[in-house]
Amino acid sequence: MSDRQEQWLAAERLALALTEGGMQRMSARTLAVFLFTDTETVTMGQIAERLGVSAGSVSGAVRTLLSVGLIERLPAPGSRREHYRLRDDAWPRLFSTQNTVVQVMLQAADTGIATTEPGDPAHQRLARMRDFYQFLLDELPSLLQRWHQRQLPRP
């Protein structure tokens, strides 16, 4: 097996792991293309060709990856096709956009707490849930700041 074939096998394994973690299958496979490509940008047609699927099936995955901030659309003068690339700040951007998920979980916990009595085990479990998500929300800015500091170029 060639090095390139081994890379694409690893890409498919990564996509499978992402799918098992809850990501839509086509989004996971598309993200794997962005991670393993040896070019600066890719088009939907190139992604479809790499995955052996139709360009139409890739468009929803690209929209999803754009919406969460993992990829970005780039101008491609002279090209009739849209070009995309993995953002340099993809992972912290994804993590920070997850704040909306944390907010939803906090609101769900608060709603549940409001409908239960303080001595009720459900109330206690929901309070623990709320406290955990509030902790995450409170820690996120400093965590991302430490990450950015770690990424600064070193002399």
Image: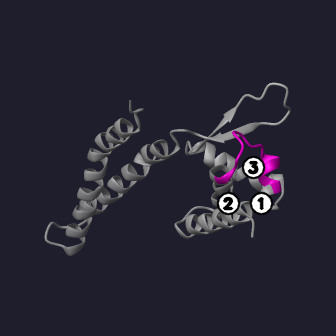
- Judged from the image, the secondary structure of the residue bearing numbered disc 2 is helix
Q: Is residue 41 left or right of residue 148?
A: right
In this picture, which residue range is highlighted in magenta? 36-49
Residue 97 is tagged as none
Q: Nearer the viewer, mark 3 or mark 2?
A: 2
Q: Nearer the viewer, residue 67 or 84?
A: 84
Residue 47 appears left or right of 11: right
Please name whichever residue, 106 or 67, is drawn nearer the observer in this view of the structure.
Answer: 67
- Side of 124 where 2 appears, left or right: right
Q: Amino acid at mark 2?
A: Arg
Q: Position of residue 115 (x, y in %)?
A: 26, 63
Q: Is disc 2 in contact with disc 1, using a CB cutoff of under 8 Å?
A: yes
- Tell me the residue that label 2 is attached to: 29
Rendered location of residue 54, percent (x, y)? 84, 57
Name the residue beneath numbered marker 1: 51
Q: CA distance from mark 3 to mark 1?
A: 13 Å
Residue type at mark 1 is Leu
Quickly name the residue at label 3.
Answer: 59
Q: Residue at coordinates 63% horizontally, 49% vertically from top-left?
A: 64
Where disc 3 sits, the SS reads helix
Task: Tell me: residue 36, above or below residue 10.
Answer: above
Give amino acid for label 3.
Answer: Ser
Residue in the foreground of this view, choosing between 102 and 75: 75
**Closer to the camera, 52 or 1?**
1
Question: Sequence-wise, which precedes: disc 3 or disc 2?
Answer: 2
Could you tell me which residue is drawn at 44 percent across and 49 percent down? Answer: 98
Work out which quarter of the rendered image holds the C terminus and state it: top left
Instruction: Please report whichever mark, 2 or 1, sits nearer to the chain's N-terminal start.
Output: 2
Q: Disc 3 or disc 1, which is closer to the eye? A: 1
> CA–CA distance between discs 3 and 2?
12 Å
Q: Is residue 39 magenta?
A: yes
